[in-house]
């Protein structure tokens, strides 16, 4: 895996321009993940080196340049998000469940904080306000989140990712993958 056993911090990532959906998922899972469609390869390499981030890419050339420069990189050649998350979990040791205490804003990577229900009154649809008691606010962009009907789909994808992760472990063993 890409994390040192003595390292207490969670892995941090930088995702290339072809994998914006992966960036959003990693953020929801609670991982500090940089993503900008304007990042060029040299910028991704520079940020990863300076900040100790793992590059996640679909660009074989970027992946090889990273490895040749001693930068951790995960190359994803699969299309399904559940497969991508399973493979990242295998290589980088990420968890495949959402903990709202750790979750980050999928849009801007800001940290989320639990909000008092009264704080969101008038800022979310009335029906949502009446149906839900738990809300989270992004400390950076101010977007408000709640566990709504989309949650079922999120859980289905993560459940599938966990199954695929177990299959990867069985087929690849404990081998360290670059």
Image (cartoon, rainbow, N blue to C red):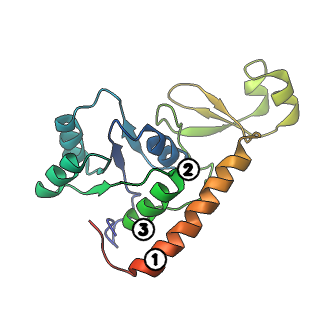
Q: Is residue 117 left or right of residue 79?
A: right
Badge 1 vs badge 3, beta-carbon distance below 8 Å: yes
Residue 90: numbered disc: 3
Q: Residue at x 53, y 42 (%)?
A: 104
Q: Which residue is mark 1?
A: 169
Which of 126/166 is in front?
166
The Cα–Cα distance between marks 1 and 3, rounded to whole angstroms, is 7 Å
Look at the numbered disc 3 and give the secondary structure of its residue: helix
Residue 178: name its quadrant.
Answer: bottom left
Q: Which mark is residue 64?
A: none
Give how far apart the Cα atoms at labels 2 and 1 are. Answer: 25 Å
Q: Which residue is mark 2?
A: 102
Precedes in sequence: disc 2 or disc 1? 2
How crowded pointer 3 is (Cα within 10 Å; few <14, some 14-19, many 20+) is rated as many
Q: Position of residue 122 (x, y in %)?
A: 77, 17
Q: Position of residue 10 (x, y in %)?
A: 41, 57
Work out which quarter of the rendered image holds the N terminus and state it.
bottom left
- At mark 1, the secondary structure is helix
Q: Residues within 10 Å of mark 1 (few under 14, many from 20)?
A: some
Left or right of residue 152: residue 85: left
């Amino acid at each position: 895996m890409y994390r040192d056993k003595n390292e207490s911090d969670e892995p941090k990532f930088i995702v290339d321009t072809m994998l914006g959906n992966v960036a959003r998922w990693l953020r929801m899972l609670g991982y500090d993940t940089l993503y900008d469609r304007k990042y060029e390869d040299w910028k991704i390499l520079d940020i990863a080196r300076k900040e100790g981030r793992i590059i996640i890419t679909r660009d074989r050339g970027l992946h090889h340049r990273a490895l040749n420069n001693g930068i951790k990189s995960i190359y994803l050649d699969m299309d399904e998000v559940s497969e991508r998350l399973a493979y990242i979990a295998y290589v980088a040791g990420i968890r495949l469940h959402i903990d709202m205490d750790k979750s980050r804003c999928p849009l801007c990577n800001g940290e989320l904080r639990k909000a008092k229900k009264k704080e969101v009154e008038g800022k979310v649809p009335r029906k949502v306000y009446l149906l839900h008691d738990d809300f989270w606010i992004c400390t950076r962009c101010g977007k408000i989140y709640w566990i709504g009907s989309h949650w079922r789909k999120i859980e289905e994808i993560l459940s599938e990712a966990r199954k695929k992760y177990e299959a990867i472990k069985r087929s690849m063993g404990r081998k360290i993958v670059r």
